[in-house]
């Protein structure tokens, strides 16, 4: 059942790629959208059949692949990966729907988006370290080409920078994975049989360092963040939606699945430093967002700050904080995708994203009143206004992290205040006041431009009012994961205490 999620976009990419060269961009878009929606609906079917109370991997598939390398085709789904799979299916469909019908080389474009979706899906499903790495690298080339070919004026620079950073990320992750398997004496890369808790603490710290830096580049965390603003600014709107909404979550997912879960002793040892690292990312990203005049770059820097909350929650490693981390991933995926869609509509109609040029877009007669209203909803959600998903996800992160790291949590809470500051600047300058002379003759905004953001706005409000519909799938898995980690830490502490007592005797 799980392989269908990978095969459907691959089949769609093949059909579009091998179709006659004379087909129109509109036809290619429709075909890609059909296959993306089929994959999304299949994730809904899996979610309906999913049993939240079971903490083991469900719908598991295991096929021997390359025995000489210890590589097997192991797939599975649990409460950590399920919401991310649904998010990927939803945003891939929205990205294809929001793509320009008149873009150049449409067949290649939609093939790459479907390949990107297949790679991300496979990474979330993989229950084998090497298989995860293969899928993790699979999304690299499509995203590079999507930025390099259909990006802005500096697309070559941004795409190359992204490629270099992500390649380094992959090298570090692969080195850590190989070290885990070889040093633990495992015969294969399967997560189910891997036992790294017996490794010495120094070895675990070395392996965890590679995972932290590798996935820290992907999230991204300061100081490995510099590729992200350039990539967002030069990428087209649909690609920014996928980049912020889904691809960054590969980094936070990797930290939880392979860092906190596999190396709990080293994770606990570094936890205070990780919480401090989260504070730096939150405050730095928020401060940089305040200084921006480009709407898209402001939203890009806001992503750096909001992903820092996930690291804080993971560092605290309590059941409530890790549940908040998953909620924050979903919340950020929906809100950032909505904001990038709205910024894309503004740029398409007004011809600029510069806050010094555009003003008064909320004008009911000649402006974009509906787009402005949706932007206010997105800004309120990102700033943590009650009744929105952004509020409840950040509240759960803070509530779960405060007992462990009170100082770092309070400092991160400043980031929420800064979020309100820079998004208030954006809304006040771009949408309120008198309509500026540079944007007086705005083209008409059709409902086809509004529908994707409106769908996301509805989901943000629904899950903000009723978050239980979201957490019921995740909570049992997270609780079991954190409790297992605590047992391992207790055993490690007992061993250390026993060794010290024996030396004294």
Image: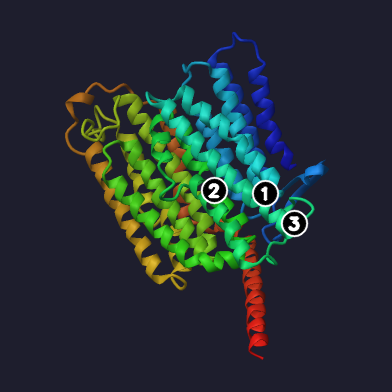
Image spot of residue 290 (x, y percent)? 27, 47
Direction from residue 280 to residue 494 in the image, left or right:
right
First in sequence: mark 3 or mark 1?
1
Q: Residue furthest bottom?
A: 505
Q: How many marks?
A: 3
Question: How far is disc 1 from disc 2 in space, using C-alphas?
Answer: 34 Å
Q: What element carries label 1?
A: helix
Whole-percent x, y for residue 288 in the image: 31, 47
Q: Are marks 1 and 2 in contact (CB under 8 Å)?
A: no
Q: Nearer the viewer, residue 40 or 320?
A: 320
Residue under the point 59% across and 38% down:
89
Q: Indicate which disc residue 214 carries.
A: 2
The mark closer to the camera, 1 or 2, is 2
Residue at the (72%, 37%) spot, across then down: 4
The residue that appears at 41% across and 62% down in the rendered structure is: 276
Q: Report whether residue 423 is seen.
A: no
Going from the N terminus, do you reach mark 2 or mark 3 first? 3
The numbered mark at residue 192 is 3
SS type, badge 3: helix
Q: In this view, does 499 lie above or below 349?
A: below
Q: How crowded is mark 3: few (under 14 residues within 10 Å), some or many (20 or more)?
A: few
Distance CA(mark 2)–CA(mark 3):
22 Å
Q: Quadrant of residue 497?
A: bottom right
Q: Which residue is drawn at 69% across and 27% down?
A: 11
Compute the Cα span from label 3 to label 1. 25 Å
Q: Name the residue under label 1.
A: 48
Residue 227 at x, y percent in the picture = 43, 39
Q: Residues within 10 Å of mark 2 (few under 14, many from 20)?
A: many
Q: Quadrant of residue 318?
A: bottom right
């Amino acid at each position: 059942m799980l392989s269908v999620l990978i095969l459907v976009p691959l089949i769609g990419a093949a059909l579009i790629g091998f179709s006659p060269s004379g087909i129109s961009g509109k036809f290619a878009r429709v075909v890609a959208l059909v296959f993306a929606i089929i994959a999304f609906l299949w994730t809904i079917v899996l979610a309906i059949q999913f049993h939240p109370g079971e903490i083991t991997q469900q719908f598991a598939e295991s096929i021997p692949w390359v025995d000489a390398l210890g590589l097997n085709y192991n797939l599975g789904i649990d409460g950590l990966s399920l919401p991310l799979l649904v998010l990927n299916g939803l945003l891939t469909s929205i990205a294809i729907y929001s793509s320009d019908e008149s873009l150049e080389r449409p067949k290649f474009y939609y093939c790459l988006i479907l390949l990107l979706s297949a790679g991300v899906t496979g990474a979330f499903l993989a229950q084998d370290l090497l298989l995860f790495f293969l899928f993790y690298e699979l999304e690299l080339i499509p995203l590079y080409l999507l930025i390099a070919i259909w990006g802005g004026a500096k697309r070559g620079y941004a795409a190359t920078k992204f490629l270099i950073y992500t390649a380094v990320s992959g090298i570090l992750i692969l080195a850590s994975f190989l070290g885990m398997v070889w040093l633990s004496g495992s015969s294969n890369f399967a997560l189910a049989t891997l036992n790294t808790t017996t490794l010495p603490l120094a070895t675990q710290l070395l392996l965890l360092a590679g995972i932290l830096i590798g996935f820290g580049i992907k999230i991204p965390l300061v100081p490995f963040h510099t590729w992200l603003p350039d990539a967002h600014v030069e990428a087209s709107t649909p690609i920014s939606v996928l980049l912020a909404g889904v691809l960054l979550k590969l980094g936070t997912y990797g930290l939880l699945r392979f860092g906190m879960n596999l190396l709990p002793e080293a994770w606990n040892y570094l936890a205070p430093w990780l919480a401090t690292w989260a504070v730096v990312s939150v405050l730095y990203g928020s401060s940089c967002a305040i200084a921006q005049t480009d709407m898209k770059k402001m939203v890009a820097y806001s992503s750096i700050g909001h992903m820092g909350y996930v690291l804080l929650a993971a560092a605290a490693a309590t059941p409530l904080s890790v549940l908040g981390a998953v909620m924050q991933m979903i919340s950020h995926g929906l809100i950032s995708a909505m904001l990038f869609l709205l910024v894309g509509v503004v740029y398409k109609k007004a011809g600029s994203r510069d806050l010094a040029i555009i003003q008064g877009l909320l004008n009911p007669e000649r402006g974009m009143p509906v787009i402005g209203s949706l932007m206010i909803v997105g800004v309120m959600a990102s700033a943590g206004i009650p009744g929105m998903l952004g509020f409840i996800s950040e509240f759960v992160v803070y509530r779960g992290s405060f007992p462990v790291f009170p100082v770092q949590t309070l400092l991160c809470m400043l980031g929420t205040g800064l979020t309100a500051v820079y998004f208030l600047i954006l809304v006040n300058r771009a949408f309120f006041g008198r309509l500026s002379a540079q944007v007086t003759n705005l083209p008409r905004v059709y409902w086809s431009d509004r529908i994707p953001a409106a769908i996301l706005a509805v989901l943000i409000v629904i899950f903000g009012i009723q978050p239980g519909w979201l957490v019921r799938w995740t909570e049992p898995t997270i609780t079991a994961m954190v409790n297992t980690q605590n047992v391992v830490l207790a055993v490690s502490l007992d061993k250390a205490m026993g060794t010290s007592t024996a030396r004294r005797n």
